[in-house]
Image (tube, rainbow, N blue to C red):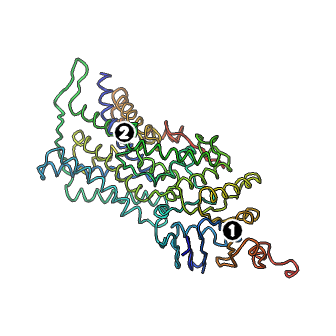
Amino acid sequence: MLTQLIISSLVIGSIYSLMALAMSITYKASEIPNFAQGEMAMISTFVTFVLLNSGGLSFYPAILITILFSFCLGLLLEFIFLRRAKDPTPLSFIVITIGFQLMLYGIAGWKWGSDQRQINLPFSESKVIFQNDSVAITELNLATLVIAVAVLFLIFLLVQKTKLGLAMKACQQNVNASRMNGIPSDKILAISFGISSVVGTIAGVLVAPIITLDPSMMWDPLLKGFAAAVLGGMKSLYGVVIGGFLLGIIENLFGFYISIEFKSVVAFAIIVLVLYFKPSGLFDKHYVRKV
Amino acid sequence: MAFFEVKNLKKVFGGLTAVDGLNFALEQKEIFSIIGPNGAGKSTIFNCVNGLYTPEEGEVIFKGENLVGKRPDQVAQYGIARTFQNLELFAHMSTLDNLMLGRHIKMKTSVLGSSFLSFKRSKAAKEEMHHRRKVEEIIDFLELESSRDQFVSNLPYGKQKLVELGRALSLEPDLLLLDEPAAGLTQEEKEEMIFWIRDIRDLLGITVVLIEHNMQMVKNISDRILAINFGKPITQGTPAEVLAHPEVIRAYLGEDVNEAV
């Protein structure tokens, strides 16, 4: 039973990890926690749904177009809304992202209503790949885990091994110095939002068959992703990913052994505890500013 | 035509005119200093040159092109590097990484190409090695070996200033803008800084504009000096001429004691 629990924890944990990573990418670049993340992923997932059902596309072209769409959605948020802000403070940025979130939520509600829909991925929930007395792994479980880990790996490569990653790191540490060294900080920020949006969208598409598709589908994953990011340390990419998996495990074990009713409260208890005992998160290096 | 020219520069903040009617021109390989009391508008001139501010009027001409309206990263592409009065460093990176970032604009490899860095003979790896060599040269040049792999935030202030200078050099600029290079340095470090600025001009052939309060330094290394006060030029010329100018003396040392009484 425990093995089965751990497996399902890892599956949901991988979704949390993706959401946390998406949040961390933009937070690292701009210190803005993007609350529109979830809704951006939701809209993009609806795009997949439309392409699959009305568009008649098969899964892979549909997902490619979706990724492109969500990347542009990220650019759009930065370019149209955040960049225009006059004398911005972190608070005004947060309000802008919340505004964007409500806007997207409204659009989705108007266009698709609040019906719960089914999205058909090429991975089946009923096809069991591995089974013995205590454990069963479905195709969907395995695919979710594999895809999530692959995406996490790609993002690490991107951030740590490429010129773009270096530029992102530079802008995050000192915008003025970056610009002086020929790094177009505005573009880098826009690209960060684009990439973060794509990561969120992959989480959205993967989670859609588990929780059914509707405009409020990403609320829970967003908040859990946020909790995971706080747990791991917002600014450490490794940290937030580990935080995501940890949260999945803690939540499931708590739900099974202690109380299923309070299962979703665990995440918020964790936020409070982390902020109380180690505000920089479990894995973030804590820099003390010298005076 | 002059190598670098600022024509009729004007910058206004709200009701305050920070810089007004400023003209100067530099020949290649000159060391040119701008002096003036605090708040005279010196740093504003630099900020207008490299695109942090857009001036209300005037032109900044470099290599025959007007730079006004260009973004800082574009100005950097033209070959203008600068340092700041209050250091602007990547504090949580090593000295080496800070300098490598200065090479950023020189790197040609695309995002995809650079993903294959791990393959030794790839184009990206070769390029990386080339830039690494250049950066190592600068580290040698400024004698930064001992701080090479340390986090910049852990270095003493004087070293941090050198790292910032090194990062500006790693852009391989044609024009270097130094904003108070001697501020906060010990006497010994100041003297070293004078050497380095001279070497930068003599050995690397870079034209230097500096803003400085330290008269010893200014007198020592400048070919010409521009003195400003309240954003307006007082005079310009050789160090001897400018430092003997009565208005410069008044701006720096205050009204003559006898007149004030």
Would residue B97 be found to the left or right of residue A160 on screen? right
Looking at this view, is B211 or A255 the one in front? B211
Name the kind of residue labelled 2 in the image: Ser
Numbered label attached to residue A226: none
The secondary element bearing badge 1 is classed as: loop
Q: Are marks 1 and 2 in contact (CB under 8 Å)?
A: no
Residue tagged by mark 1? Answer: B223
Q: Is residue B19 above or below residue A9?
A: below
Subunit ID for the residue under disc 2: A
The image quarter containing residue B225 is bottom right
Looking at this view, is A131 or B18 the one in front? B18
Would residue B208 be found to the left or right of residue A233 on screen? right
Residue depth check, mark 1 versus mark 2: number of the one nearer the observer: 1
Looking at this view, is B14 or B63 the one in front? B63
Numbered label attached to residue A17: 2
The secondary element bearing badge 2 is classed as: helix
Subunit ID for the residue under disc 1: B
At a point 27% along the width and 47% down the height, the residue shown is: A217
Question: Around disc 2, counting alpha carbons within 10 Å, would you say few (fewer than 14), some (14 to 19), or many (20 or more)?
Answer: many
At a point 36% along the width and 34% down the height, the residue shown is: A248
**Could you confirm whether marks 1 and 2 are on the same chain?**
no
Name the kind of residue labelled 1 in the image: Asp
| Total numbered labels | 2
Quadrant position of the N terminus of chain A in the picture: top left
Q: Could you give the CA–CA distance between mark 1 and mark 2, rounded to whole angstroms?
A: 60 Å
Q: Can residue A173 be seen in this view?
A: yes
Question: What percent of the width, then of the height, locates residue B100?
Answer: 51, 48
